[in-house]
Image (spheres, rainbow, N blue to C red):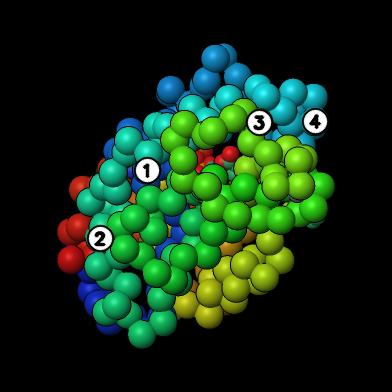
Amino acid sequence: MQWEQVKDWLSAARSIAVLTGAGISAESGIPTFRGEGGLWRNFRAEDLATPQAFARDPLLVWEWYAWRRELIARAEPNPGHLALAALEPRIPEFHLITQNVDGLHDRAGSRAILKIHGDLWDLRCTRCQRQWTDRSVPLVELPPRCECGSIARPGVVWFGEGLPPCVWEQARRAASGCQLLLVVGTSAVVYPAAGLAPLAKSAGAKVVEVNVGDTPLSDLADVTLRGPASEILPVVCG
Ligand code: BV8
Ligand code: ZN
């Protein structure tokens, strides 16, 4: 049975990397980007998560992020997040690479998190570049302002923007150095993140995909476990 096979690989591996996407937070009630319910006021994420959208209408973009912050503040990590946090201390070399900006892996207790798309609880000044964390829900004012008076932006990576170089380099190193890459809840359409699985594979890692449906990575994976992350991860990581 494939789950047993993955369970054995996970308990024997010295170095494991995990790549997570919006699907791992779906069962915490956070809508995914491309699934049903991924829309907000009939906008698509690709239309709002861009520097152009923010330059055109910073208040609209901030209303979207404020809505997500409120949703996430009410959400809890689910058994999928918790299973990855419980697995981490048992593996000598463990990296959790996430595309998610919701902070649920931190709240689940994970430590070695590489946030390649940033964190929606971080803010960055559009002028003096000061960066700080603001967990207030609701935010005091929209758009939020820096002490220098300029408006702040969410501390996330938008489409068309480069990933934080240091974090991205660590993610590439984790993917190319691991024996096993676990890809959980991502549609594998966003680059360069989606390139981590082929990178791991070409470096000799086993690739296991956990997803409710097929993705462009499914053929490349050594094993695909079909089903919700909150059911599969506690079993295979347990
Ligand atoms: C870059 C942060 C270059 C913000 C995000 C044209 C113009 C400009 C750029 C491009 C272009 N064409 C291509 C590109 C590149 C672009 C890209 O890949 N576009 C895609 C759409 C084609 N990439 C970029 O722009 C990146 N930057 O290339 O810069 C550059 C380089 C140097 C210097 C300057 C520039 C930046 C990409 C990062 C964008 N930011 N998020 C925010 O969150 O607000 S991406 C966004 O999509 C989220 O981070 C999300 O995580 C990510 C990927 O989505 P998924 O996580 O996979 O979620 P999705 O909904 O798609 O899928 C959910 C999956 O879960 C599904 O498979 C579903 O089946 C599964 N699922 C559902 N429920 C469950 C489940 N699985 C398990 N259990 C369940 N219960
Ligand atoms: Zn400032």
Q: Which of 135 and 95 is in front in this view?
A: 135
Q: Of helix, strand and loop, which one carries label 2?
A: helix
Task: Report how far apart the C-alphas of labels 2 and 3 lie in the structure.
Answer: 36 Å
> At label 3, which amino acid type do we have?
Pro
Considering the numbered disc 3 on the image, is that residue within a helix, a strand or a loop?
loop
Reply above or below: 164 against 78.
Answer: below
Q: Name the residue under label 2.
A: 83
Q: Which amino acid does label 2 sit on?
A: Ala
User: Which residue is at a point 66% across and 55% down the rendered structure image?
Assistant: 131
- Mark 4 — residue? 55
Instruction: Give the mark nearest the N terminus, 4 or 1.
Output: 1
**Pair 3/4: label in front:** 3
Judging by the rendered image, the residue that carries numbered circle 3 is 143
Q: Nearer the viewer, residue 162 or 121?
A: 121
Using the image as rendered, state which of residue 148 and residue 228 is in the foreground.
148
Q: How crowded is mark 1: few (under 14 residues within 10 Å), some or many (20 or more)?
A: many
- Compared across the picture, whether 177 is left or right of 89 comes to right
- Residue 96, image quadrant: bottom left
Q: Which of marks 2 and 1 is nearer the N terminus?
A: 1
